[in-house]
Image (cartoon, helix red, strand yellow):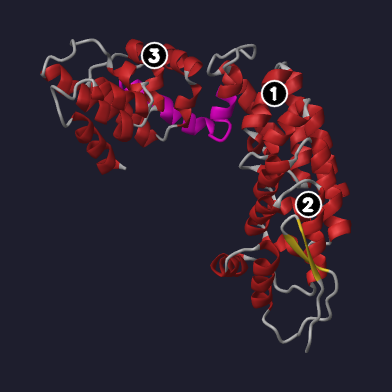
Amino acid sequence: MFRFSIFFRSHGFRYSTLSSTIDANRNPHLLLVDYLMDSLQFSKKDAISISTKSKVTHLKSTINSDLVLNIFKTYGLDLPQIRQIVSSVPKILTCKPNKTLEPKIRVFHELGLSGSDLVTFIQNNPHIMWSGLGTKIMPCLQLLRQILGSDEIVIQVMNNRTRRLFFTNNFMERLSTNVLLLQNFGLLNERIVMFVLNNPNKLIVDPTLLESKLSYVEEKLGISRESPIFIHALSAVLWYTDSEIERKMQNFRSFGWSDSDIALLFMSQPYCLTMSEANMRNKLNFYMKDLGYTPSYLMSCNSFFTYSLDKRVIPRNTMLKILREKKLVSSDKPSLITIASYKESRFLEFLRGFEDDVPCLREIYLDTVKRVS
């Protein structure tokens, strides 16, 4: 069967202005490969890769796909940006251009998304192109705007890794109910916004559970709802049962911590509660038995609990021991907490200062880290 097409080029695109019915016997994936190469200038290798991973089962006409590309061009996207979208979401070529695609792109554009930001948004939210505009997208955007107060923050939340939750009725119902619960509990709106921004998935928990955890943080952990740390503590305990938290606290008690010590630590570093029991015991064993640190010292250096023992603390402690043995640093300066807090680049620069005395120090350190990675 013959196919006749008249093409024209505009801004690097090739569009089909007339196309007869495609041969029904032609492999649809091969057709997609041809289209990707002809219209979007993909290499054959890349076109085959995109076609293979795509869920596109047919491409009835190039006219539809040409219109999809033209809509993106109309909203200011250039060829490389459109290629990014199609590479990530090849199924988008089968969207109904005027009924499905354009109205959504218009809404996102009005939200403040354009150019590379729009590309990133579509790549992060491919499912959104097949969600109902009036039934899912607009109600969700309106709710998020009402809670978060600005389109900029809405976009940040929508790009969160848990974004797939947003376009379900359950999410919107739970979010609305739980935000009201947080407001009635007396939390400041700016802290609620922070919680939604960082933990949208945690706001789909059962409201009864959320209410019980609000009480737990204030009554059991002794953290006032007015404290800036309250919302972080809530996030830390939300998915743990009371018995799980109690077992974590028992780990500290077994190393000589009093309940008041534990409470003070959690007040300053609530995410200690998110460590596994094994990880918690390993850290307590190293800091208290191997290094001889006391609860009061660890409370004052609580960031120790946020660092990886194997990949950060132990390798750096080994380097510090070498320097002390060679009397290149004093016995107390720099402290382990100081060098543990350094970014990797700064720590390597710190080691560089001792190359004349210990030529292979940086290599020893990097090899130590590599062996545990």
| Pointer 2 residue | 73
Residue at 62 percent of width and 33 percent of height: 199
Q: Secondary structure at mark 2?
A: helix
Q: How dense is the environment of label 1, judged by Cα within 10 Å: few (below 14), some, or many (20 and up)? A: some
- Secondary structure mostly taken by the magenta-highlighted segment of the chain: helix
Q: Count of labels shown? A: 3
Q: Quadrant of residue 337?
A: top left
| C-beta proximity under 8 Å, tags 1 and 2 | no
Q: Answer with mark 1 or mark 2, whichever residue precedes in sequence.
A: 2
Q: Secondary structure at mark 1?
A: helix
| Relative vertical location of residue 227 with respect to residue 85 in this rendering, above or below | above
* Helix, strand or loop at mark 3: helix
Which corner quadrant of the image does residue 303 belong to?
top left
**Residue at 84% across, 56% down:** 100
| Amino acid type, mark 3 | Met
Please state which of the two labelled residues, at mark 2 or mark 3, is closer to the viewer.
Answer: 2
* Place of residue 139 in the rendered image (x, y in percent of width and height, measured from the top left): 84, 41
Q: Which disc, if any, is residue 192? A: 1
Q: Looking at the rendering, which quadrant does residue 146 occupy? A: top right
Whether residue 350 is visible here, answered yes or no, is yes
User: Which of the marked residues, 2 or 3, is nearer the chain's N terminus?
Assistant: 2
Does the segment drawn in magenta span residue 179? no
Q: Nearer the viewer, residue 75 or 128?
A: 75
Q: For mark 3, what is the residue? A: 299
* Residue 244 in magenta stretch: yes
> Is 178 placed left or right of 51 in the picture?
right
The residue segment tinted magenta is 233-256
Disc 1 to disc 2, C-alpha distance: 38 Å
Quadrant, the C terminus? top left
